[in-house]
Image (cartoon, grey):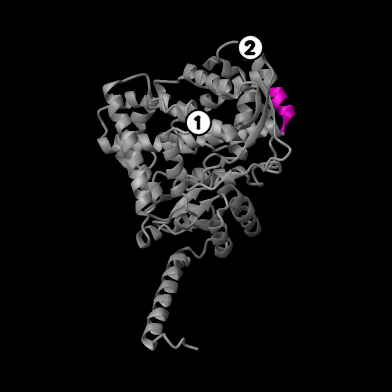
Amino acid sequence: MIPPNLSLSTLHCILFTLAVLCFGLYRLLRVPPHLRHIPKVPLFPLLLSYFSGEVEEQRVKRLVLPFAKRMQTDVVLVYCLGDWMVQVLETKLGKQLLENPNVWKQRQSQDMLLWRLIGNDNVFMSNGEMAKRHLRVVRNAIQRTMPIDMFADLARTTMSLMGDGGRVRWDDYANRYTLDAFGRGVVGYDFEALSKPSGSFVKRYQEVMAAIANPAYVVLPVLERWLPRRQVQKMIDSFVDDLCKIMEEKRKNPGNDVLTYMFQEPDMTEVEYRDNCIVMFVAGHDTTAGAISSVVYFLARHPEIQDKVREEVLAVLGDDEPRVEHFLRTPYLNAVLRESMRNNTPSNATLPRICDIPVQIGPYVIPPNTPMVLNMCAAHHNQTVWSDPDAFDPQRFLDDAKAEASNWVTFGIGPRKCLARNFSLYEQRVLVSMLLREYRWTLPEDSIHRDHLKNGFQAFALSLPENLHIDFTRITPL
């Protein structure tokens, strides 16, 4: 029955508007006809997962991998970031995709605020000659510095804040440690994240990332056009402006850092310097923070492994300052770090790739201009590749398990593999080895992570443990 105060023409307008909205959503969410030959992960459970804020690794384990197992396939179609994407769930097929010279990274629209933040003209997003130029400049700059002493200095600062131990929110410490490591090692700037945890820069970065990670806008990026978030755009632009000021200061005061060495290469524009600085900040800092949080968690859950890796560290390092050559003689520590990053992969998927010709991935021909990704989280938990994939077992990365270990793809595959992987690995090795010398640690009985490690929702599909409290006990005198 029509309400008495509602005219027939108004009702027609409402019904027409609803019909247009429904048709628009149908067009957005339907599988294109040319992709219907690829097994599709059911849409409705995916949407429920996205809008509930479920994190990527839980969605992969709960929806994507069980579906792939039922369909007996390692290539599936998944609705993601406002589009239907082909997701590859196995390493060999991932190599087939990422090492194909005809495949390139999809240029992202700045409708999604994540891409507004990091830009397209950087080593992560570029293609062709621009990509070769960026890879050369960034690789050369990173290879000129490996600040082990700085990592050790920051580790000592972290432990001085921890004192005799007690209950510590470890994900917060890991985030602050890696932010300062990035600041001093990459841009030659002290963010003072460890000494000033409520500092304006740290707080603003956290606010920007939290605002970007609104589930509705991550699922339907078109909402940025329909319902633009002007305030969030201003936050992003202000944050980028502050990083640009740091870059300007670095030009005037060069040092022993990645940005200084990048500036010595004349082959980049100002926009390219800026975009590279921002993407290294966002991707490099967060992923390493997540990795450091994860490995401390797994060692808390497995005290026998913690004892074994501590024994190795003490035998190799003793009381010495950490040096690169030490970590050539710590195979078990290296295996622990790799297994931690397999179990809780810091970055769950590669950036989307496309091709202007059909691509064969396994049994499927992928039509031109279809977004394709390697889902690294799925590849690391694929039961056809890994024995007992949910178990934490560093032994799988030692000499007698090379076949399994060859499927480890935390830093990607092929020519676009993460350039800063050694920077990240040494950042982790130094802090974890120094922690092992000074502390034992356990997981509190009432921890929300008691059954499994819980990550926070991220727009970048990163695995960042959240509210991770750890009980530390000092084993050496202050």
- Magenta span: predominant SS is helix
User: How much space separates mark 2 and mark 1, taking CA atoms?
Assistant: 27 Å
Decide if residue 131 is in sight here. Answer: no
Residue flagged by tag 2: what amino acid is it? Answer: Gly
Q: Is residue 227 left or right of residue 293?
A: left
As drawn, 163 above or below 91: above
Quarter residue 82 falls in: bottom left
Which residue is found at the position 40% from the left and 79% from the top?
A: 14
Does the magenta-highlighted stretch encompass residue 274?
no
Q: Label 2 belongs to which residue?
A: 318
Please name whichever residue, 281 or 191, is drawn nearer the observer in this view of the structure.
191
Q: Give the mark nearer the N terminus: 2 vs 1.
A: 1
- Disc 2 is placed on an element classified as loop
Decide if residue 232 is in sight here. Answer: yes
- Mark 2: few, some, or many residues within 10 Å (few <14, many ≥20)? few
Quarter residue 403 falls in: top right
Please name which of the two marks, 2 or 1, marks the residue nearer to the observer: 1
Range of residues picked out in magenta:
302-309
Residue flagged by tag 1: what amino acid is it? Answer: Arg
Q: Position of residue 164 (x, y in %)?
A: 65, 21
- Residue 394: which numbered mark, if any? none
- Mark 1: few, some, or many residues within 10 Å (few <14, many ≥20)? many
Quadrant where the image shows the C terminus: top right
Q: Is residue 339 left or right of residue 212?
A: right
Q: Label 1 belongs to which residue?
A: 176
Quarter residue 99 falls in: top left
Please name whichever residue, 433 or 125, is drawn nearer the observer in this view of the structure.
433
Please name whichever residue, 229 or 44, is drawn nearer the observer in this view of the structure.
229
Which residue is found at the position 65% from the left and 59% from the top?
A: 70
Which residue is found at the position 36% from the left and 51% from the top?
A: 231
